[in-house]
């Protein structure tokens, strides 16, 4: 059997568009997952987005976040900082 499509699938381009716009927004103006979910459910014709649930929206946003950064040419976030320590000369 083929897996059934997600109820969120029709709204994924909208969510991705919001996340792309947030790349240029100041930190305090960016959308949280709750704000994205509220926007999807507030729109009259997007009533089905509420059926998907906020956990599904959260999973989509978390999975697409690094991909959207790469698609926008921002590259992946560098979270690894090499550390150097002076050599220990016991004595």
Image (cartoon, rainbow, N blue to C red):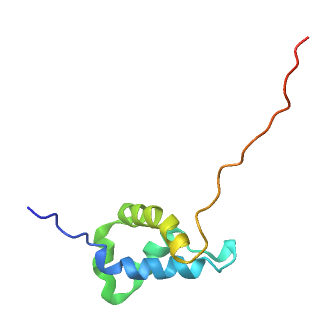
From the top left corner, tell me how far across and down residue 8 is, in percent: 31, 73
Q: Residue at x 55, y 78 (%)?
A: 72
Check the picture and name the quadrant holding the N terminus: bottom left
Check the picture and name the quadrant holding the C terminus: top right
Q: Residue furthest bottom?
A: 44
The answer to which quarter of the image holds residue 4 is: bottom left
Q: Is residue 14 visible?
A: yes
From the top left corner, tell me how far across and down residue 60 is, in percent: 40, 65
Q: Residue at x 35, y 79 (%)?
A: 11
Residue 24 versus residue 5 in the image, above or below: below
The answer to which quarter of the image holds residue 10 is: bottom left
The residue lying toward the viewer, choosing from 34 and 68, is 68
Q: Residue at x 62, y 61 (%)?
A: 77
The answer to which quarter of the image holds residue 13 is: bottom left
Q: Residue furthest right?
A: 91
Q: Using residue 38 as the reference point, say whether residue 2 is left or right of it.
A: left
Q: Is residue 41 visible?
A: no
Q: Using residue 24 as the reference point, say whether residue 1 is left or right of it.
A: left
The residue lying toward the viewer, choosing from 66 and 82, is 82
Q: How many marks?
A: 0
From the top left corner, tell me how far across and down residue 84 is, in percent: 79, 38
From the top left corner, tell me how far across and down residue 71 is, in percent: 51, 75
Q: Residue furthest left?
A: 1
Q: Residue at x 42, y 82 (%)?
A: 14
């Amino acid at each position: 059997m083929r897996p059934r499509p997600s109820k969120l699938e029709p709204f994924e381009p909208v969510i991705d568009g919001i996340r792309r716009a947030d790349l240029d927004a100041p930190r305090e103006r960016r959308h949280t997952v709750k704000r994205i979910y509220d926007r999807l459910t507030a729109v009259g014709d997007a009533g089905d987005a509420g059926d998907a649930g906020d956990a599904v929206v959260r999973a989509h946003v978390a999975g697409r976040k690094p991909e959207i950064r790469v698609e926008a040419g921002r590259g992946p976030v560098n979270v690894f900082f090499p550390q150097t320590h002076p050599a220990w000369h016991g004595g």
